[in-house]
């Protein structure tokens, strides 16, 4: 018959079973998922008539004129701390690792006399338009493969616009901003 010992063992087994069941219930409470309404993944929607013919809508970027129109010059100035190790920004500033950037907007590329520009920069030619600056600051080597500007790039489109809006002010007669909506 059931001895005191057997009772204890049965009790222990029952106890562990209850514990296991309890853990199972709690586990389900923690890890259960709400039922999916429609099975499958949500794929990013395609941009309608996007410039690059179907970039994901989530990455749609406002045009540079639009970004410049709402740019924050002060924020741009503080963002150029990342550039100051290599560039001076004041009028008459000297070359450092990179050429001085006062008046860079609208100025021809590689135009600082005596600065040792890379061959890639010399080959690029043309003036520093807002657009070119946007591409160059986004990815220096992506825009001018072979540039010796050792800066990884600023991926945030609005931050780039802020920087460019600040660069634009570094001039005695700033180049007019491009009209938004163009
Ligand atoms: C590690 C140093 C370094 C940093 C950081 C750096 N640059 Fe430069 N930058 C250079 C060098 C070197 C060149 C010359 C590139 C060449 O000749 O290929 C250059 C060239 C440029 C030019 C072209 C100037 C001209 O006279 O044609 C622009 C514009 C420019 N940098 C903007 C920036 C901005 C804006 C930042 C910060 C967001 C920045 N750079 C950060 C080193 C740097």
Image: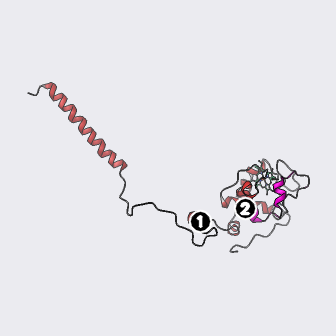
Please state, as top left, top right, bottom left or bottom right, where the N terminus lies in the image: top left
Mark 1 and 2 residues: CB-CB less than 8 Å, in contact? Answer: no
- Where is residue 75 drawn, in percent x and y? 70, 57
Residue 120 x/y as whole percent: 81, 55
Q: Is residue 95 left or right of residue 81?
A: right
User: Which quadrant is home to the C terminus?
Assistant: bottom right
Residue 166: assigned label: none
Give yes or no for residue 165 being in the magenta stretch. Answer: no
Q: Position of residue 174 (x, y in %)?
A: 82, 66
From the viewer's perspective, is 17 left or right of 104? left
Q: Position of residue 28 (x, y in %)?
A: 32, 48
Q: Is residue 100 left or right of residue 7?
A: right
Q: Nearer the viewer, residue 135 or 68?
A: 135
Q: Nearer the viewer, residue 118 or 157?
A: 118
Select label 1 or label 2 by which is in front.
1
Segment tinted magenta in the rendering: 112-135
- Residue drawn at x 47%, y 62% is 42
Q: Which mark is residue 55?
A: 1
**Residue furthest out toward the left:** 1
Secondary structure state at the residue bearing disc 1: loop
* Separation of residues labelled 1 and 2 (CA atoms): 19 Å
| Residue drawn where x is 75% and y is 71% of the image | 178
Q: Residue 130 in magenta?
A: yes
Q: Which residue is mark 2?
A: 134
Whether residue 73 appears in this view of the structure is: no
Q: Quadrant of residue 20?
A: top left
Could you classify mark 2 by the number of other residues whose Cα lies within 10 Å: few (under 14), some (14-19), or many (20 or more)? many
Q: Quadrant of residue 49?
A: bottom right
For residue 85, above or below residue 111: above
């Amino acid at each position: 018959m059931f001895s005191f010992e057997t009772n204890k063992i049965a009790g222990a087994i029952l106890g562990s079973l209850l514990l296991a069941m309890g853990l199972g219930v709690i586990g389900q409470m923690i890890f259960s998922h709400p039922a999916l309404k429609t099975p499958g993944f949500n794929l990013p929607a395609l941009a309608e008539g996007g410039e690059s013919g179907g970039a994901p809508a989530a990455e749609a970027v406002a045009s540079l004129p639009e970004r410049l129109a709402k740019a924050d010059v002060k924020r741009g100035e503080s963002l150029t701390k990342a550039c100051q190790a290599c560039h001076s920004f004041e009028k008459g500033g000297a070359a450092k690792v990179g050429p001085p950037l006062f008046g860079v907007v609208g100025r021809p590329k590689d135009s600082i006399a005596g600065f040792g520009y890379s061959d890639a920069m010399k080959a690029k030619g043309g003036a520093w338009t807002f657009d070119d600056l946007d591409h160059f600051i986004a990815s220096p080597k992506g825009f001018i493969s072979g540039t010796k500007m050792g800066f990884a790039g600023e991926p945030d489109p609005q931050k780039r616009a802020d920087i460019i809006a600040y660069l634009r002010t570094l001039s005695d007669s700033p180049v007019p901003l491009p009209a938004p909506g163009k």
